[in-house]
Image: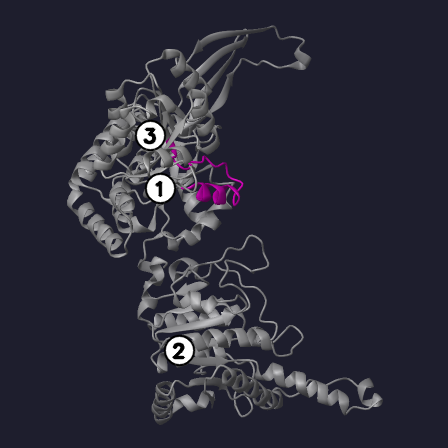
Amino acid sequence: MDPTRVFVKNVKRVVFKVGTAVVTRSDGRLAVGRVGAIFEQLEALNSQGYEIILVTSGAVGAGRQRLKYRKLLNSSFADLQKPQVEIDGKACAAVGQNGLMALYDSLFSQLDITSSQLLVTDNDFKSTDFRTQLSQTVNSLLALRSIPIFNENDAISTRRAPYEDSTGIFWDNDSLAALLALELKADLLVLLSDVEGLYSGPPTDPNSKLIHTYIKQKHLGAITFGDKSRVGRGGMTAKVKAAVSAADSGTPVVIASGFVAGNIGKVLEGQRIGTLFHKDAHAWVTFNEFTAREMADAARDCSMRLQSISSKERNKILLDIADALEEKQDLIKVENEADVAAANDAGYDESLISRLVLSPAKISALAKSVRTIAEMEEPIGRVVTKTELADGLILEKTTCPLGVLLIIFESRPDALVQIASLAIRSGNGLLLKGGKEARRTNEILHKVITGVIPETVGEKLIGLVTSKEEIPDLLKLDDVIDLVIPRGSNRLVSEIKSSTKIPVLGHSDGICHVYVDTSANMQMARNIIMDSKLDYPAACNAMETLLVHKDFSSSEGLQDLVVELSHGGVTLHGGPRASSRLKIPEVQTFHHEYNSRACTIEIVDDVKAAVDHIRKHGSGHTECIIAEDKRTAEYFLQHIDSAAVFHNASTRFCDGMRFGLGAEVGISTSKIHARGPVGVEGLLTTKWVLRGNGHIVKGDEGVIYTHKNIVSSES
């Protein structure tokens, strides 16, 4: 559920308005299929206990279509040669209303719903008695689960065009719907249109952006409206005026498309559908105040300011973050405990909850890692190579920030702190989308971190994306966002890669292997295996598959190891050979990341078979060999193509902090740009800087190239 739409949990009475463009087709005939689909959604809500009130347009359009047909049938050839006079709108309304309600009654009857018609005029609402009687009648109908259907009685209305004037109580069915929402004390007004919602400009303009939340202080006067409705009186301008009026009076409004299947249900589920109008919108300090582009642009602007300040000033920001984490520890703990409690109530597994917990010890460790990053050598502007191209012509290759990063990470709130710190150290803007299970913890951490960023840089340097519905819009911004880093499953990485032109640094599954060779030291093997599996089972660098040499498997060593793992609470699964030998359940697939106290065991013939198994079933994360024979170990190290390969060391060492990077934005299983634990270096690129003194090429006639290396970085 979108954070700005949580109020829908308390919605019971809803006014729906369907416009003429929704009710009729482009040729003027009634859109029976579309109306039927809308009514099916209303029936579903009605059966769930919602009180549904319907306001409909379309009578004039439907009547005009029928009368034109009748007029054509009754006209002589001579009549058709005369100038055609437009059919009276009031006559059209009278004829169309009859047909419209006949259709509505028929469709609702098919759904076993009783509908009722209430026709009103502008003048009716001038009577206090009328208003009282109207409310009583509607309440009676709703109590009987009937759906009241309202329409302006155009046939006898005394008001004439122009319809909108300063004296009118309402001037079209949009403003009528807003008026009824207030009169009948509705909890929500939904205006169904032929477009997805309110755009920043005409919807046909490719530069127009859908506005998810209307904020008067921001959008008033800044929106360019398109043409008037093709069939009705007002179009989007009328809808916005009606929506603003209702929202200011306390009734939330959503403008959404009536053409999209299931839209009504999604609105009532709190999904980010259409445009929301709410009296408190101006006070919401969330991602939803901004479009995806605005948020990304703000991050880029702030990153440019971050790069312009001194290294000492950037370090101070990090040190202030570390201090703030410790000072606000109690606040962080409260929000984190709320997330953990919600996860427990939802029945999430142990591995997710263990990643979610942010203990005081973890917070202290995070503060320490932030200080470590602050103490690192300045990464921006470091000269990687320096070459004399010709006399007086010097070329440098220097490090520089990537720009704006979009990082989508799992429910590990400690990752937010690490990623933000690395982004600041490397001079990058940052957009973060964490797992929904850690929402409250992520929000308080984001607030703590951005609260110490000085105004000279701007707190919008780091944006927190609160809804997954925003991700598709962000992935379109290849002109603003420079790198996407998804941390999670292969499926997530694949979906991101197929949805964007932005370069993606993939952090895939962590299917880590430990191979025990026949030459392994038994005690060393037990220590490494137990640490790789049990130090932190939910980590991506925890052992998931244990491969053992066939000779080792025939000794007592394997049986002892199985007993020790079992005593550690590890659930064992086996490949075909191991399951038969050890009497354990056989796995369906070797390509499985448990993230828990479970692992797969399989027996292989030798180191070559172990390498083949890892190549076939691994994810390219971290692999380990335990062996005393150096030739065997070197074969493994040289032939395994994973981001990290270890000899006689736990897979748990594959970590940015343990590698001396201070922290990590993730462990990349990609082969381009950065691989393995990605720290500050992985968030930088390079640029060429050439310094000359009036040098020109001129066909290379006057240039004597020396290409002399002056200095190169030790890295």
Disc 3: which residue: 425
Along the line of sight, the residue nearer the viewer: 39 or 296: 39
Residue 20 is one of the magenta-drawn residues: no
| Local crowd size for mark 3, using a 10 Å CA cut-off: few (<14), some (14–19), many (≥20) | many
Residue lying farthest to the right in this orientation? 78
Tag 2: amino acid: Ser
| Local crowd size for mark 1, using a 10 Å CA cut-off: few (<14), some (14–19), many (≥20) | some
Residue that appears at 31% across and 18% down: 520
The quarter holding residue 44 reads bottom left
Tag 3: amino acid: Arg
Q: Position of residue 185 (x, y in %)?
A: 33, 79
The quarter holding residue 637 reads top left
The figure's colour scheme reads: one colour
Disc 1: which residue: 585
Residue that appears at 58% across and 70% down: 228
Q: Position of residue 80 (x, y in %)?
A: 80, 86
Disc 2: which residue: 47
522 displayed left or right of 152? left
SS type, badge 3: helix
Residue mark closest to the camera, 3 vs 2? 2
Q: Can residue 171 be seen by looking at this rendering?
A: no
